[in-house]
Amino acid sequence: MLRRRLVVLPWATIGIWSAVLLGAALRLRHFLANRSLWLDEALLANALLEHPLAGLTRPLSDNQAAPFGYLLTEHVAVWLFGSGEPALRLVALLCSLAALPLFVLVARRLLSPSAVLFATLTFALSRPELYYAAEVKPYGPDVLVALIFLLMGVALAGTPTRATLALSALAGSLLIWCSYPAILMASGVGVALCAHAAVRRDRAALLRRAGVLGLWVASFVVCYLLTIRPVVENSFLQAYWSDHFAPLPPRSLGDLRWYLEQPLALFGSDVAGFSLIGAGAFLALFGVAALARTGRLALALCVAPIGFTIAAAALRHYPFEGRLLIFLAPGVLLLVAEGLLALHRLARPLASWLAPVMALLLLAGMVIEDRGLIVAPGREELRPVLEYVSAHRAADDRVYIYYGAEPATRYYAPRLGLDSAVVRYGSNVRHDLVALQRELAGLSGRTWVVFAHVYDGDGIDEERFALYLLDSQGVQLQRVRSPSATAYLYDLGEPEPTSIPLRIKS
């Protein structure tokens, strides 16, 4: 049975809600830093702003994808507050802030009382939770949706009233439209509830829970046909995510190893937020063992969505990769917290220091991971570079935009007064140095050359290579640099053919 809410010590309650306030402050700090949109955000922001509200069920441009409900709330935010970065990130922030107290409610119902504080601290400090609180992406809202499904699982576990059943059925059916992995959470929670009722031979509970699950699945079927199927059938996205689907059937030891190694990634810095993956997985095993003895339904609610996500990856319907998996982080963190408490009980009195030391190491690793977001949250700070170019550009200066900087520049250019008549966007010549040479050879006169999201793989740094070409064509007059974004002013004269090597190494 699920634990009822128990009275905890006042110091623990103070600690829990202090952790919530700390998490809220860190999320607000990241949001208020108002960093520039980076490439992925800009692609989605441009697609969203170009997409009419009446056509939300149609695919977005540039192979972008986002749930119907997320796009709808983004349009509402833009309508209320404009199309600036804070408005675009407001949905993610509000969802992240709401997830903090909701996580506490779920933890208090699923965990031993003494494990709730550590669980809340890890959720408050988890780097993915902080980062996606200020990102124009639906991954942060996915976490809130996952927590609501867990809370509905708790509400449906006993003998719910008709109002609770109706509210859960309606809320779950709507949330399916707001988050792509919502159906994975719905399936995990619903199947866990039905299995629990079947084991207990509670036919009435089984029928109630199966009815709610059936409505959730029905809502998903409609949502899939109207909004999700074009995403699943998108050949570009299938190719992009092809390395993140589970091998089915496994044909080698390497394929079998996938099913062992990839679930471990759930404990890493991209999902749960731990830098010590092994320690997190070790404690989670203790948590599984503890809940298997005292709270089997709680264990099923945490674990079943992971199983459905792996199954979806095996069927090539949902990639098993970092940011797409942070909706599973709450369940993982709950298992780790319960495992820490179980280890402490097992190790005392001979090694009573072991669990506190592991807790400190895990939390210290999280703080170290968070430091970059807190001190210097910028990722690709193209906005200040473009502001400088706009302010210092002479009337006859031209602006050339490297292809990696194009999406963000298309967002910022009209807002900074960079007329489309003077801006030239480069072609996507990734890994093709001859094409890059040909393109830059066509530039002439005073030209600002702007770089961001530069390709630097396979021994090639395209920015360094481009500068080598430009230095051979003309004279560099100015340079402005910010994190991962740069602009150079060149006087290139008239274009001349240039003989260059085909490849240089960084």
Image (spheres, grey):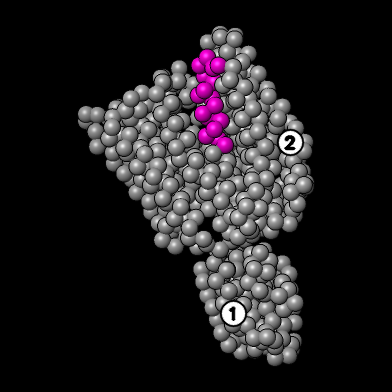
Q: Is residue 49 above or below residue 218?
A: below
Main SS type for the magenta part?
Answer: helix
Q: Residue at x 41, y 29 (%)?
A: 108
Q: Which residue is mark 2?
A: 224
Magenta-highlighted residues: 145-161
Q: Is residue 55 above or below residue 3?
A: below
Q: Quadrant of residue 145?
A: top right
Q: Viewer-proximal residue, 201 or 350?
A: 201
Q: Residue at x 50, y 16 (%)?
A: 158
Q: Quadrant of the C terminus?
A: bottom right
Q: Viewer-proximal residue, 257 or 364?
A: 364
Q: CA distance from mark 1 to mark 2?
A: 47 Å
Q: Viewer-proximal residue, 53 or 187?
A: 53
Query: Would you say 302 lies left or right of 313 here?
Result: left
Q: Residues within 10 Å of mark 1 (few under 14, many from 20)?
A: few
Q: Amino acid at mark 2?
A: Tyr
Q: Please, which residue is most extreme toward the front here?
A: 80
How many numbered discs sit on the rendered protein?
2
